Amino acid sequence: MSENVTVTRPGISAVTDLGRSAGGAVGQMSGGALDQYSARVANALVASHPRAPLVELVAADFAALTSVNLLVAVTGAPADVSVAGVPMPQWEPFWWPAGTELAVTSLRQGLRVYLAVHGEVQAPLLLGSCAPDSVLGFSGPLRRMDEIGVEPGPLRLQDAVLGSPVVRGAARPMRFAEHWRIPVTDGPDRDQFGSSAERLHEGRFVISTTSNHVGLRLRPDASASLPARERTDEVLSRGVPIGAVEVPAGDELLVLHRGRGVTAGYPVLAVVTATGLSRLGQARPGHSVEFVRVTLAEAVAAARAERALIDGVSSRMTRLLSAQTSYRPGDESPATHRVAS
Amino acid sequence: MTSLASSGCAVQVLDCGDSAVRVTVNDQDRHVSWRIVHGLAALLRQTQAPGVQAILPTYDSLLVEFDCAATDHTAIRAEVVGLTDQLDSLPVRTPRTFRVPVCYGGEYGPDLTTVAGLFGLTPSEVIALHTAEPLLIRCFGSPAGAPMMDGPRFPAPVPRLASPRALVSAGAVAVAGRQAVVSACPAPGGWQVLGRTPLSLVDPHREPIAPYLPGDSLRFHSIAAADFEAEQGMLA
């Protein structure tokens, strides 16, 4: 039997995952969830695979109907989440009963909300990922009345009570603010900026409205000024990392995010850390950013600490959910990541 | 073929954020640097080192992206340095040459006469140089994996447009500096557009999505505007 989720109010939403790392080898962007932390936590809370497809909502209201009882989790920016009009928590799993509408409205403070499902979300794959690629024309935004195929996971409570969270996931919500302290490490071309490189860490930069999944553009506010290149020799095209901070001609900084072209000829002044990139995935136009210089060791330690938290949520939820179901002994992955092409 | 492993070139591994390193190769011969960079990329893909996510080789460098929760800079650095001894063990792939029809000039190539003027050549002479020999693909470029090639033997480097175009069509055949490219998808661009091919280069619904690889070549030939539609299809 094929079950599905029908989109009744798409807003700006898409089925995505952690991105297409295999695309880089053939010159394609990574794409995928811009707030990888919230996306990973959402899947962890429903004991799904970290790379399982999930829905990413950007800024606007969203609603959908399900044909089957689903265990779901909603993470990311604060919003009003409800099922059949009953308020539901974020950063905790809850039941979405068959025939009811789940709504996510009034997104605030951040930009992106993630909706993950215990079980299998069906989505076409390109090079191992369902992440949309607007450049290639692969996949794309959800539209009204789109049907997303779902196969509920092994946990099936016949007496699911509307709105009752089954367990506590103990996930740590992201902290939201209008001013973001974003850690960066020195880029490989920092010396090309001489002493002006320091300006990146002095004062605040304001996110402009032309920012998107390709990158964020930021203008220095009154307290800040732009670093400037001291050398202008032509740079051969090189692979650029996600998070690269560049200073193109003009009056803005550019921070590349997951939709970036994989090669470019600009020097890399600094690189936003993995944990910082998730936060920038939530920062709104008009928000201000302070780029805090950290060492590589500090950045790696922060990324590992964050991942350990998520892994903790995942194993806890897997254990708790397994205890509630007639689970096959020895099978430690309740949400096997199978996706139909 | 000269030995790459014994070329004695300097391989430098620079930290590039918490989840990537940039490996640069500085041989006196840029062609040797390029071969080493792509050789290292192929070896890294073969070894499937844990945590490695993407390997992006271009001209004199490759970017290795990884999950820093699963591996670290030290491990990747050791992996790369260890592989430099194995460069000569790579199987040699026979490169392919693709024939690419191009409508030069007019609405298809708005900068043909400008480029001709820069060199004191006629448009026909520019076309003759652009079609004279296959152009070697050095790497995938942005966006969408466009083939980045060595340019034709023009008398001097080609300057970029003073003001980039907001939109350049897919299939645009362009030059800048000592380089040449064919656009894989519509995008803004600051290169001088000489013509346009009716062929599509990438298709997300094909496997592989692009038929060419670095090391292959594109051989351009001139077609009449009247034949543009008839020649449409996929590059193959």
Image (cartoon, coloured by chain):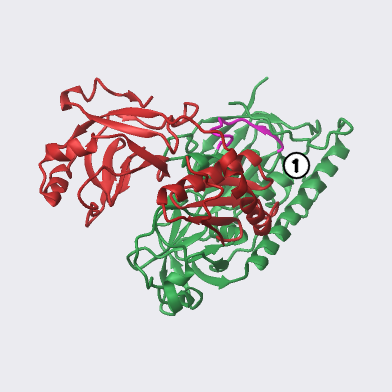
For the N terminus of chain A, the quadrant is top right
Q: Position of residue A284 (x, y in %)?
A: 49, 60
Label 1: which residue? A47
Q: Is residue A122 above or below residue B13?
A: above
Q: Is residue A20 visible?
A: no
Residue drawn at 34 percent across, 68 percent down: A251
Neighbor class of circle 1 (other Cα within 10 Å; few <14, some 14-19, many 20+) is: many
**Picture quadrant where residue A135 is located:** top left
Q: Is residue A99 above or below residue B61?
A: above
Q: Position of residue B142 (x, y in %)?
A: 40, 46
Q: Position of residue B37 (x, y in %)?
A: 50, 48
Q: Which residues are magenta?
A: A118-130
- Give B83 or A241, whichever is nearer the viewer: B83
Which colour is chain A painted? green
Residue drawn at 22 percent across, 37 percent down: B195
The chain coloured red is B
Q: Which residue type does callout 1 highlight?
A: Ala
For the C terminus of chain A, the quadrant is top right
Residue drawn at 38 percent across, 70 percent down: A229
